[in-house]
Every structure is written in structure tokens, then in C-alpha cells.
Amino acid sequence: MKYYFRPWSFNLTRNSRIAPALVVVLILASLLASCQGYTPPPDTLHPAATHTPTPARTHRVTLSPAGTTTPAPSPASTQVPVSTLDVTAADLKGAKIQFWFAENESVPSQGGVGVMQQMVERFNRENTWGITVELAAYPDYPEVYEKLRTYIYGDLPDLVLLYDDQASRLNAAGDLVVDLSSYVQDPVWGLTTGEQSDFYPQFWAASTGVKRTGAPFYRSAQVLLYNQTWAAELGFDGPPSDPSEFKDQACQAAKANREDDLPENDGTGGWVVDTDTATLAAWLMAYGGEIANPGESRGYAFDSAETRQALTFLKGLYDEQCAWVSAGRYPNVEFAGRRALFINSSVSGLPFQVDAFLDTLSSDQWTVLPYPSPGDQPVIYTYGPSFVVMKSSPVNQLAAWLLARWLLSPENQALWTESHGTLPVRLSVTSLLASYAGSHPQWAAALELVPYARNAPSRPSWDVVRWVLNDAGKQLFSPAFTASQIPELIDILSDTATEMDQQFR
């Protein structure tokens, strides 16, 4: 079966003092519309299995033919679950499927590709249906998506890891993605109600819309890093609870660096400016704003009082010299060297910050914080790939789902978390990660912030619109930009995002 993408084109014009820089980025972004340049079942392979956690760090997934047996029916009922998928265990015998994913996407030094290979090889050896999985690893998620576009006229994989906006775009282009709702809910091959409720609700809901395009595998998050030792020396007895306290601490740190005896510290301290989309989105959400319009509504919600308040706050930090721009992309060394009280980081990047403290021989204590909110609704901005089943044959689709379901077992989640330092998507995984949490206190602090998680948008246009938001951030912190121009900047951001979204309808 062949599928074809529906073409789209872009026509962007706007006259403004600010618009030229945005238009340049958008022309580039439109050429990159298929790229995602980012800078998440039971423990057996048998229907309706019930998971019993193993002790921490054992991580053995049982693939025995019996699995966890289905309880004997009560005298009052002799009903046997009947699948709605019209595929039997015998049909699965000898099925061969392809699985594509991105290797080394999170923490290359920790060898995540090896973990995935080991898991898939074990599945191939031990699954009772004789399903064989061929694993193909690509350097990153943009390349995975590009390969899908390249193969659109030929053979597509049966299972693939994609970000939710990529899956939505793929589905909109040609209805290529299986609706997993019927697989999740199937009484024989699906997940029980208890297993579904074991997923963090915000992660489980991320792939849902008109249909369920995926099941989350892992998540990373954009967070703030905070030097507790230095803050205490500056006279603060705890982390900031709102933007006002955040500003007080940032300004005090900047003042301390201006007044010390080290000329190289002048102009540093406080918060390191970051125009990355994830950072800007987190601040907007912390102020109560939305990125995409809620529910099934189309478009984006940048034109709001909350967006104006957030951008005005950030611009004020910069103008009052309580925030500064680092020459490097990753200010890990600056943070470890007390040239910043706060920096932005992904959860996946925490190991690099640990290394920076070791390299600088710093004994300062530091931790992970959410983005503070004036309305007592702090935020961490979360993102990550989901398992997406591509349309093929009923047998291959079910085989792909069974592989995904198995990879989502708590034990496999624990294996992936320990190798990558990402956030698991299931609640029960925490009992398997007690030892890991004890030796990774910043990761443990990040895990405690999951209740504050807000998902990245899943709209097909988000891969382009996120570059528009990124460029708006660069405008905001450019030396010639003034706070009085913020309303105009938001108008351009909102109008351009709307126009971009219309190209993907």
C-alpha cells in the first residue's frame, strides 16, 4: 500500500520594524517543516497480564508462555474475553516487523542505543508468538521523520518512535497512523484499567485528540537549576516561590558579582537568558498562558494578557541587569562557577551539570526547580517521543502494539531511565528506581515535579511555530528592543503562528 503526503506551501509577508527577522526565520522554518530539532503494558507478553513489581534494580521482564494467569471465573460468570481486533495468537506466529527509533537522542555518553538493542533482542528471543523485530536506529528524531517521508512511496516501518506533533503531521498528511484506542482498550490484547491509570495522566493524555496517535515512552523536561549554597550565602532561606522572589534572588546574585573583586564576574549573576522554545514556553505557561488553543480548537493562544505579563517580566530582568546572555549555548560551567544563580536545563542534561561541578571542584549544593508562577501554578515543560503504530496489516499492527506494550513495562521503563536519565511515564516505576534516585538527587527532585508538567503542543504545525516563538525570544532580548515593543511583538507572533497553522490544515 502506498501513501502520499498532501503538499503545502507558505506565503508570509508582514511590514513591521520587527517582522524582517521573523520572516527570515520563518522562510527557513518552512523549509524545515519536516524536521524536529529538539537541543517516553504488562510485564508479560500475554493478554490482560497483571504486573507485580520486582525488587529495585533487578529489571527482569518475564516472557514465559503462561505469564500472569487470568484469574479463574467466578461461579456466576463463565465469560471469556473476546478480542475486537480479529487477530489470533496463531495469526501472529512468525510475524516480522520493523521498528525505527532515534539512538543517542538524550545522553549519548550513556549508550541508550545499547539498551534498546538489548530489550528488542530479548523480545525476539523470548516472546511466545515467534514475532521477529528488525530494529533500525537513526541519529535523531528529525532524521527518523525524514526517513518516513522518504519511504512514503515504499515500505514503512510497523512501529516508530516520534514526537506527538510529528505523528499528528504524518497522520494529517495521509492518514498513516493507527488509532491505538482500540488496541489499548481491547479486552485480550490491551491494557487493563489499572495499567492505564498507572501512567502519569498528563503524559498518557498527550497523544490523544481526534484519535490516539501514540503511547508515551519517556519524557524529558525543561527545568530551572538553582544553586542552594550560594543562595543561602546571599541571605535567602529557600528557593523562590513566585516570579517576584525569583527576581529578588537573581538581582541580588548579579549585585554580588558586580561588587566582588573579580572583574570577569561583572555583568554576570542572576539568571542566564535562554531563548530556547522550551524555556519560553515554560515561562508563558507559568504565567497561566497557553501555547496552543485548548481542546480541539485550531491555532495558538499567544495573544493573551498572560503572554504579555511573562514577556514583560523577562524583559525587565534583562533590562535591570538581573539576567545576562552567556557566550556558550550550555552554561554549565558558569552555573558551577557561581556566575549564575539560575540556569535552564533539560532533565536529560543533568549529568552534564554534575560533571561541570566535578570539573570545577565545587562543593556547592544545587537542585532542580519548576518555573515560578504568580498564580501558584509552577510549571515544567515536558516533551518526548511516543510509540506510533503505522498502518499496514492487522497482524503486523497487533505485533507492533505488543512490542510497544512490552517496552512500556515498568521494568523496561526503569532500564531506559537509568541509561538515559529521563523521566518515566509510569508511576509504578518509582519503586524500581529507589537506588537510582538515591545516587541522583537532582533527577529525584525533577521526578517530584511531574505533577507540574505541561505537555508540548501536538499540533502538526508546532515544528514550524516553535521556531517562530524562538525568534520572538531573540527579538525580546536584543539590545535595541524596548519593553514598549512587546505588544507589537506578540501581534506578529500570534499572526504568524496562525498563518503557519493554516498551512497544515
Image: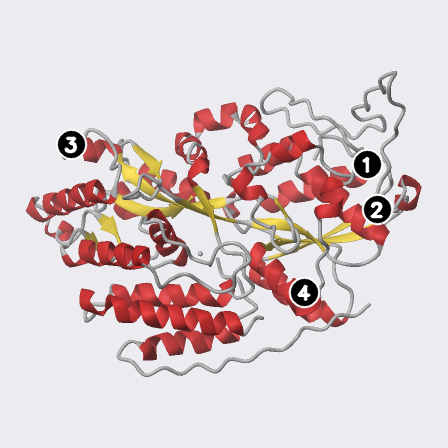
| Residue positioned 13% across, 32% down in the render | 235
Q: Which residue is mark 1?
A: 188
Q: Which residue is mark 3?
A: 233
Give the SS element for disc 1: loop
Mark 3 is on which residue type?
Answer: Glu
Q: Earlier in the sequence, mark 4 or mark 2?
A: 2
Q: Which residue is mark 2?
A: 85
134 with respect to 326 (left or right): right
| Residue positioned 58% across, 28% down in the render | 428
Tag 1 near tag 3, CB within 8 Å: no
402 with respect to 327 (left or right): right
Tag 1 near tag 2, CB within 8 Å: yes
Mark 2 is on which residue type?
Answer: Leu
Query: Label 4 vs label 2: CA separation?
Result: 26 Å
- Badge 3, how many Cα within 10 Å: few under 14, some, many 20+? few
Tag 4 near tag 2, CB within 8 Å: no
Provide residue 311's location: percent of width, then percent of height.
Answer: 27, 58
Give the SS element for disc 4: helix
| Residue positioned 85% across, 20% down in the render | 73
Q: Which residue is mark 4?
A: 148
Q: Earlier in the sequence, mark 1 or mark 4?
A: 4
Provide residue 286's location: percent of width, then percent of height.
Answer: 34, 47
Indicate which label's residue lies in the foreground, 1 or 3: 1
Q: Quadrant of the C terminus?
A: bottom right
Quarter of the view holding residue 267: bottom left
